[in-house]
Amino acid sequence: MINPPKKSSRFSRREALHTVGGTIAVTAASSAAGLTGGARAATPSVEASDRTETGFWPNGARLAVSLSLMFEGGGQPISGAGGVIPDPIEKGVPDLPTNAFFAYGHYEGIPRVLDLMDKYAIKLSSFMIGKAVETSPDLAREIVRRGHEAAAHGRVWDNSYQLPRDEEKRFIADSVESIQKVTGQNPIGWNAYWMRNSISILETLQDLGFLYHIDEPSRDEPFIVPVRGRDFVTVPYTFHMNDIVSFPFVGWNPAAYELALRDEFDQLYEEGARRRRMMVVSLHDRISGHAGRVRSLDRFLAYARSKPDVWFARKDEIARWALSSRNATPVVKRGPPAITGLPGSAA
């Protein structure tokens, strides 16, 4: 067992992510073919990575496992946020049961997940919406008090990619200020609504003092993108290990999700003997915080904890490790996002 090192008309997102989960392989293959075969985009340059003297991760660990917990309740619009009720409500009418569903995450979900993390001595990264933090400040402080990372997730639960650059910057900075004021922690990690950012996002995040973002599900390990001569880290996100994809669809249930988690873990653990591997699990307070789902997650964590050489890490820890072991971290040199269609330096 590896302990973390010391600090060295809107539609349901659930529905769309479910669709993405079933089609992402085809989409990714088509996109890759277009980017490498078309005249408009050059193939990204990736520097070779090597194993460090102590392995790919701290203390010779062969796999990093990183959990995130979305802190969103209170930051959603009171109408049109989507949820478990399939019939959309009339635009502008407060969706009372859906808002109560979001509130469940704060009343029940987060406390349950925090207790589970304590049980296994695991620290996670919580991506917090500014308005949600202001709505439930004691809960936000409790997350940080227990040793978890407070990262930024926007002013409210909404897009920012369509905003002019200065407005997008303000949208992000507002969430940072709310988190700092309430928790005392300075966020250095970013996650956008739907992972969709403007083409200048890396420069904007760099200007605001961020170290990493997670808005790219392109690899099973962290990597570096040079931005204006300085390194910026991507700690990839996930669709298929995201609880919002897995519940509550026909054919999916806590037992099926648990099996998917174990299969993902086993494959990456096996590969981790030869190359740097990272498993990412994304949890939402109002989804994974239900009793039966926490029990399923409990069994998976017991299984993962039973394996040797596994590092359970916050995403800021992973980002810092990627920078400190640069010779073992892929460095992706891309052209402007407007051309490549992938996050990179706009300069």
Image: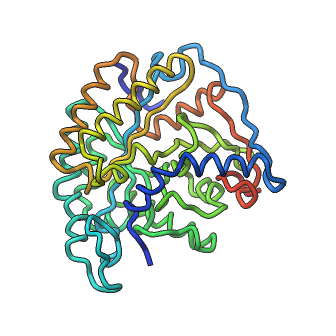
Q: Which residue shows up at 24% across the image and 43% down it?
A: 254
Where is residue 77, by image quadrant?
bottom left
Can the viewer see residue 67 in this picture? yes
Q: Which residue shows up at 36% across the image and 16% down it?
A: 308
Q: Quadrant of the C terminus?
A: bottom right
Query: Image height check: is 125 above or below 339?
Result: above
The residue furthest front is 251
Query: Image height check: is 86 above or below 331?
Result: below
Query: Image height check: is 39 above or below 80?
Result: above
Instruction: Count all numbered tags in the image, as a single digit.
Output: 0
Residue 192, position in %: x, y?
Answer: 49, 59
Q: Nearer the viewer, residue 12 or 204?
A: 12
Q: Nearer the viewer, residue 18 or 281?
A: 18
Describe residue 248's horizontal placement relative to residue 282 as left or right: left
Describe residue 5's horizontal placement relative to residue 170 as left or right: left
Q: Which residue shows up at 26% across the image and 69% down it?
A: 85
Q: Nearer the viewer, residue 79 or 15?
A: 15
Can the viewer see residue 125 in this picture? no
Residue 88, position in %: x, y?
Answer: 32, 77
Residue 14, position in %: x, y?
Answer: 37, 60
